[in-house]
Amino acid sequence: MKQLLITLALLGGGALAQTTTPPTTTPARPAPATTPAPARPAPAQTTTAQDSAVVGRVGSEVITLGEFNRAFRQAVARVLNSQGVPFEESYMAEFNDARGEYLKQYLRDRAIYQLARGSVKADAAEVDKQVADARADFESDAEFADALAGTGYASVADLRADLERQLVVGAYLRSIQGRFKFGDAVVAGNYNLNRKAFMRQREACARHILVKSQADAQAVVKELQAGGDFAKIAASKSQDPGSAAQGGDLGCFGEGDMVATFDKASFTGPLNTPQVVQSEFGWHIVLVAKRTEAGVVPLTEAAPVIREQLTREAAQKYLNAQIDKMKTESFPDVVKVTTAPAPK
């Protein structure tokens, strides 16, 4: 749980990882229940003397325990929500051991947000729109408040503040990446130095429709030969719910990744021609769009990936240098929660 929390904190913060835009967290409509669940009250927003305790300083900004606790609650909620579990205050104790580690990332996030505010202003209208869009998914204010609580927000104001931060930080990180450009010669040099990293196995890209009998499969083939739309037929007739929703598309896969009969059809059968194949799952109508032989990915395909990686790394170094210039103090003992020993 601790490592998962830290990972999600990184994803939700300002780290330049796979994207320059932090994921927008908005309350999701709860799954329908067989009986109405009682409304879950949002955590009370009361200020105590303890909330004013200082947990850190970033530049001239003082960070209080109350601010940290709100952010930590939202991070815990992200962990729970990622596993399909609505947030409840009772879960907080399970994450107490992660509070000290999370403080490190939280102070870094606040540093990035402080840098971002110096050059980017949030579009208030966009924040209003995102809040309104989130509210529109619910029939009542009570249902919306319950969903907010289930995603770790104590109030609409908390949601609005988080959305504003995400917009500002996202725009800032994109602007940093936009400063770095790498020419073709640099990209080619990186490619030549790291050719092993661009090796790929033989691949096939295919679609399929899964039916119960050979007769059903032959009927689908006739329908396709008469001009039927593969994606529409897959959506309506395929017994594979995962690919049916994608029009039967399985994407590209390596040799040996599928069951033997399906694999053979994918890698030895004709292209763009329906093939009927039986497997332990039923009868498949397989349509192979293309095959790629094993070997080194061509530079033309690798170049965008290399350029994105070089840009991200350069932007990350720049961001780290800016953060290092800011005086940061951390007081992890303030955020620790001492659990009383169980009675013997």
Image (tube, rainbow, N blue to C red):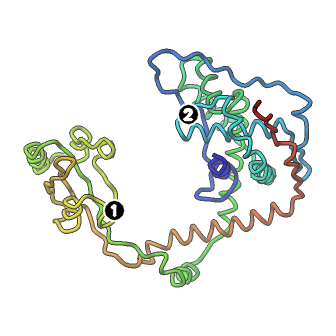
Disc 2 secondary structure class: loop
**In the rendered image, which residue does mark 1 sit on?**
253
Residue at 55% of width from left, 25% of height from top? 136
* Mark 1 surroundings: few (<14), some (14-19) or many (≥20) residues within 10 A: some
Residue at 82% of width from left, 38% of height from top? 338
Kind of residue sitting beneath label 2: Val
Q: Is residue 176 above or below residue 140?
A: below
Q: In this view, does 74 lie to the left or right of 192?
A: right
Which one is nearer the viewer's eye here, 121 or 255? 255
Among numbered discs 1 and 2, the one appearing first in the sequence: 2
Q: Is residue 22 left or right of residue 47?
A: left
Q: Distance between the residues labelled 1 and 2?
A: 32 Å
Q: Where is residue 282 in the image (x, y as percent from the top left)?
A: 18, 47
Q: In which quarter of the image is residue 87?
A: top right
Disc 1 secondary structure class: strand
Residue projecting furthest to the front: 344
Q: Is residue 22 in sight in this rendering?
A: no
Q: Where is residue 71 in the image (x, y as percent from the top left)?
A: 74, 40
Kind of residue sitting beneath label 1: Phe
**In the rendered image, which residue does mark 2 sit on?**
85
| The label number, if any, that marks residue 207 in the structure image | none
Q: Is residue 256 in sight in this rendering?
A: yes
The C terminus sits in image quarter: top right
